[in-house]
Image: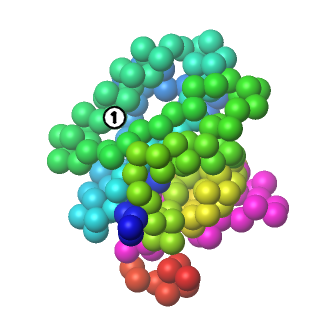
Amino acid sequence: MAGYKTAFLDRDGVLNEDPIGNYIMSPSDLKLLPGVIEGVKLLHKAGYRLIVISNQAGIGDGLFTEKDLKKVTDKLASLFAEEGIRFDGIYYCLHGKEAGCECRKPEPGLFLRATKDFTIDRSKSFFIGDKISDVEAGQKFGIKVIMLRTGHGTMEEKLITTVRPDVIVDGFLDAVNIVLSGNKAWQK
């Protein structure tokens, strides 16, 4: 059975602003980044499944609750629903930063969880993130990875040594345009 091409998307720093040193703990803290609505619409129109993959260590570290996360997630979903877009799946690691779990990026556990719910064609799928841990997780899962310079991306780009994303771009819409451009180097 053939799988679906899937756009895996990190949340903080990719879809919405990521206040460095803070967490998005309330719906009022959630602010989408420029070009995200337009980019997600383009991916949806191109037939990609849309799946959010995000570490939310603030829960495991006791800084906010799952109820708080649900409120933020509901707000995120409603912002996209207003534009006629629905995420196919949203997967979070709720463990603290030092938990050593298999679902916290850079481990691919959340991607593997998504494969239990969806048939995914890894050769036609990709992940957009803003951290080296995003790059590692996507590569361990066996998909292409685009790193954004939004969120933590500009700082993280300076730390890249052996783990390299397939592409580094300034913003979300830039990433989407590369994916949809038919660029042969990207599609290899």
Residue at 55% over, 82% down = 188
Tell me: 112 left or right of 133: left
Q: Secondary structure at mark 1?
A: helix
x 26%, y 45%: residue: 86
**Residue 90 image offset from top left, x and y in percent:** 41, 39
Residue visible at 36% across and 20% down in the picture: 71
| Image quarter of residue 144 | bottom right
Where residue 69 appears, as percent x and y from the top left, is 44, 22
Query: In this rendering, is residue 176 above or below 92?
Result: below
Residue 175 percent location from the top left of the image? 46, 65
In the image, the segment drawn in magenta is 156-180
Query: Which residue corresponds to mark 1?
Result: 76
Residue 85 drawn in magenta:
no
Residue located at (31% from left, 29% from top): 75
Circle 1 Cα neighbour tier, 10 Å, few/some/many (<14 / 14–19 / ≥20): some
Looking at numbered disc 1 in the image, what kind of residue is underneath it? Answer: Leu
In this picture, is 179 found above or below 130?
below
- The answer to if 163 sits in the magenta stretch is yes
Residue 5 in view of the camera: no
